[in-house]
Image (cartoon, grey):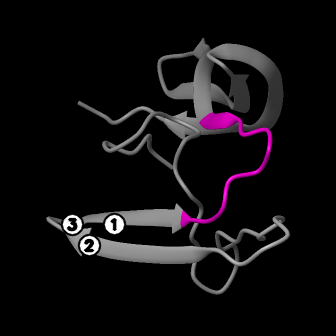
Amino acid sequence: MFIPSYVGGGEDATVVWGSIDFKFKNNRDYPIRIETSVSGGIATVDIYGLRNETEYDIRIESKTIKRTSSNIIVDAFKVYRLDGQVVKREKLSRDTYKIHPK
C-alpha cells in the first residue's frame, strides 16, 4: 500500500498471509546454502553456492513512472551486469503506492 521505509518502491518482497508469498527456485545444477538472521527488526538472507562460469551481478532497481497528489507509480526491473556493464534488464512489475498523508 505504501512505499516501505527500508527499500525503494517495487524493491520489497511480497508477503500476504494466506494469499501471496515470496518464493524462489534454485535453478543451479548444485545445492545452495541459505543463512538467515534478524537483528534490530531487519531480516537478512545470505545465499551461498558454487560459482558458474559466467556470473552476473543481479540487482533489483526501480524507477518512478508517475507521481500524483495521492499515488506514486513505480516500475521494478531485474538488472543483469557483467564486468560492470548492463547486459540485460527485465521488467518485473508496475506497482502503485499511496502517498502517506501529512
Instruction: Identify which amino acid the numbered label 3 is placed on.
Output: Gly
Residues at circles 3 and 2 in contact by the CB criterion of under 8 Å: yes
Residues at circles 2 and 1 in contact by the CB criterion of under 8 Å: yes
Instruction: Kindly identify which residue carries mark 3.
Output: 41
Element assignment for label 3: loop
Residue at figure coordinates x 71%, y 78% from the top left: 31
- Bounds of the magenta span? 48-59
Q: Tell me the CA gap for discs 3 and 2.
A: 6 Å
Element assignment for label 2: strand
Instruction: Kindly identify which residue carries mark 2.
Output: 38
Q: Is residue 98 left or right of residue 61?
A: left
Instruction: Kindly identify which residue carries mark 1.
Output: 43
Image quadrant of residue 43? bottom left
Above or below: residue 30 compared with residue 86:
below
* Front one among 96 and 60: 60
First of labels 2, 1 by sequence position: 2
Above or below: residue 54 compared with residue 38:
above
